[in-house]
Image (tube, rainbow, N blue to C red):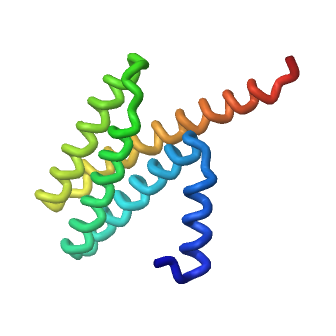
Amino acid sequence: MITSPHQKYQQTQLHTASPAQLLLMLYDGAIRFSRVGISAIEEKNYEKANVNLCKAQAVIHELIAALNYDYPIAKTLYQVYEYMIHQLINANLKKNTKPAEEVVSYLLDLREAWDTANKSLNAASEQPK
């Protein structure tokens, strides 16, 4: 049950977001959880690290589930996402921030690429015909 105004706002945002916006939200979540996991490893708070790195993996699994295999890029993205999950597992098991930091850099690059593509499509669709 949703009780706080912030939770209501978040739910409304999810229900009214475009597919591209939802994708960007997934990237934002994976980045946020990975960064919290990295910070927790640095603080030697391994329980917090585990929880957040597992959440980041779950978000990346959602990105995999959202892939459309009608496009050739989907197979490549699948491989990249699988690699990211592997690196997050490594970071979690070995309590090493380097693999998770690598994942964050890839997530940031992919998020930027999707954001740019979305803005380009929106600009093109707003052009008078």
Work out whether 7 lies above or below 16. below
Work out whether 77 lies above or below 59. above
| The C terminus sits in image quarter | top right
Q: Outermost residue, right direction?
A: 128
Work out whether 35 lies above or below 42. above
Determine whether, in the image, residue 17 is placed left or right of residue 44. Answer: right
Q: Position of residue 3 (x, y in %)?
A: 53, 82
Q: Nearer the viewer, residue 82 or 69?
A: 69
Q: In the figure, residue 48 lies in which quadrant?
A: bottom left
Q: Position of residue 92 (x, y in %)?
A: 18, 59
Q: Outermost residue, bottom direction?
A: 3
Q: Nearer the viewer, residue 87 or 67?
A: 67
- Tally the marks: 0
Q: Outermost residue, left direction?
A: 93
Q: Residue at x 30, y 53 (%)?
A: 58
Determine whether, in the image, residue 50 is placed left or right of residue 36. Answer: left
Q: Position of residue 9 (x, y in %)?
A: 61, 69
Q: Residue at x 67, y 35 (%)?
A: 119
Q: Position of residue 91 (x, y in %)?
A: 20, 54
Q: Residue at x 60, y 30 (%)?
A: 117
Q: Residue at x 51, y 52 (%)?
A: 25
Q: Outermost residue, front direction?
A: 1
Q: In the figure, residue 53 lies in which quadrant?
A: bottom left
